[in-house]
Image (tube, helix red, strand yellow):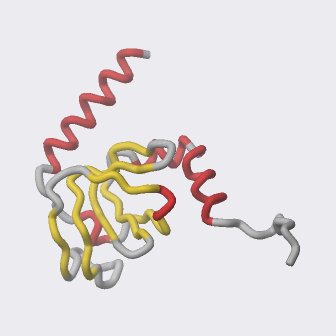
Amino acid sequence: MSEEKNQDVVTNKDILDQFKKCNGVKRCYIGKKIAVLCNRYQYRGILLEILPNDLILANARFVEISGYCDRKKTEREDDINGPIMISLASVELVYQPKWSQGPLTNEEETFDLLKKINESSTEAK
């Protein structure tokens, strides 16, 4: 077998590298409720930050059974009760199904914190 890389093939690493480089996408989802599908598990929460190798979800929940994307809530999920760090290498999909927008524990506190962070970073410029 040839070790040559087929230029037409887009790998998961290529997609993640592009995702990390794309500040527009990053700004678009920071502070928003999202769902993250990983190799084996699915989570939902508020995206706090995208680091070089990880993303941080606040108010995270482990989604056991999501149900259809157009449902208002998941069939079954567990509150992790805090932030989690997810390796970008394990991320298969970041998306916003309707059920990802459901209420989260202490979400108002997280939104207030994000607002303060954004205000202080704007003032620093």
Q: Residue at x 35, y 65 (%)?
A: 35
Quarter of the rendering containing residue 64: bottom left
In the shown orientation, is residue 73 left or right of residue 26? left
Task: State the residue at coordinates (29%, 84%).
Answer: 67
* Residue at x 51% of width, y 60% of height: 89
On screen, residue 17 above or below 98:
above
Residue 118 on image: x %, y %? 33, 30
Count of numbered badges drawn on the protein:
0
Q: Position of residue 77 (x, y in %)?
A: 19, 74
Q: Quadrant of residue 78?
A: bottom left
43 sits to left or right of 11: left
In the rendered view, tell whether residue 21 sits above or below residue 43.
above
Quadrant where the C terminus is found in the figure? top left
**Front position in the image: 112 or 86:** 86
- The answer to whether 99 is drawn above or below residue 59 in the figure is below
Residue at horizontal 23%, vertical 77%? 74
* Residue 87 x %, y %: 43, 56
Left or right: residue 1 compared with residue 76: right
Of residues 30 and 91, which is closer to you in this image? 91
Query: Quick one: quadrant of the N terminus?
Result: bottom right
The image quarter containing residue 102 is bottom left
In the figure, 121 relative to 92: above or below? above
Which residue occupies the extreme top position in the image?
Answer: 124
Horizontal and vertical percent for residue 68? Answer: 33, 84
